[in-house]
Image (tube, helix red, strand yellow):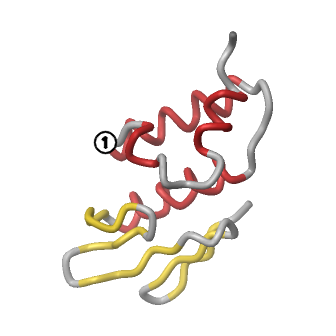
Amino acid sequence: MGVRVCEGVMYADSGQTARESPDGWLVSFLPDRYFSRNAAVTALNLAELIASGGHGDRTRLRLAESWLDELGLGWEDVRCLHRWRGFVEDNTER
């Protein structure tokens, strides 16, 4: 799990990217929103966390929810990410 930050572009191991534009950073799975550099890193870390799965780990779910809140997003905003539903279901107590 990792995010690489380069000149004008960021890469996540999950395959998600962020690219710098004149209006801010565009994150591949949130194409209609502009982010600060730090928020783009947070968004890519969120994608990494979801892609890595995890089963029955409420700490991971709380971390993901914290990052969503920090970005002003909800679970519906990241439903395009592979495994997002499984991540939520796997990490929520039944």
**Count of marks, rendered view:** 1
Q: Is residue 78 above or below residue 39?
A: above
Which residue was labeled with disc 1?
72
Query: In the current view of this chain or complex, which residue is farthest to the left?
Result: 23
- Residue 73 position in % (x across, y down): 35, 42
Q: Residue at horizontal 38%, vertical 68%?
A: 37
Query: Dot 1: within a 10 Å radius of its alpha carbon, few (fewer than 14), some, or many (20 or more) residues?
Result: few
Query: In the current view of this chain or complex, which residue is farthest to the top?
Result: 94
5 on left or right of 30: right
Q: Residue at horizontal 36%, vertical 46%?
A: 71
Quadrant for the N terminus, please. Answer: bottom right
Say which quarter of the image contains residue 93: top right
Q: Give, as a three-letter code, the residue at label 1.
A: Gly
Q: Secondary structure at mark 1?
A: loop
Q: Residue at horizontal 59%, vertical 44%?
A: 84
Quadrant for the C terminus, please. Answer: top right
- Residue 57 position in % (x across, y down): 75, 27
Judging depth in this view, the residue of 4 and 27 nearest the camera is: 27
- Residue 50 position in % (x across, y down): 64, 47
Q: Is residue 64 above or below residue 11?
A: above
Query: In the current view of this chain or complex, which residue is farthest to the right?
Result: 55
Q: Residue at horizontal 26%, vertical 73%?
A: 24
Q: Is residue 4 above or below residue 73?
A: below
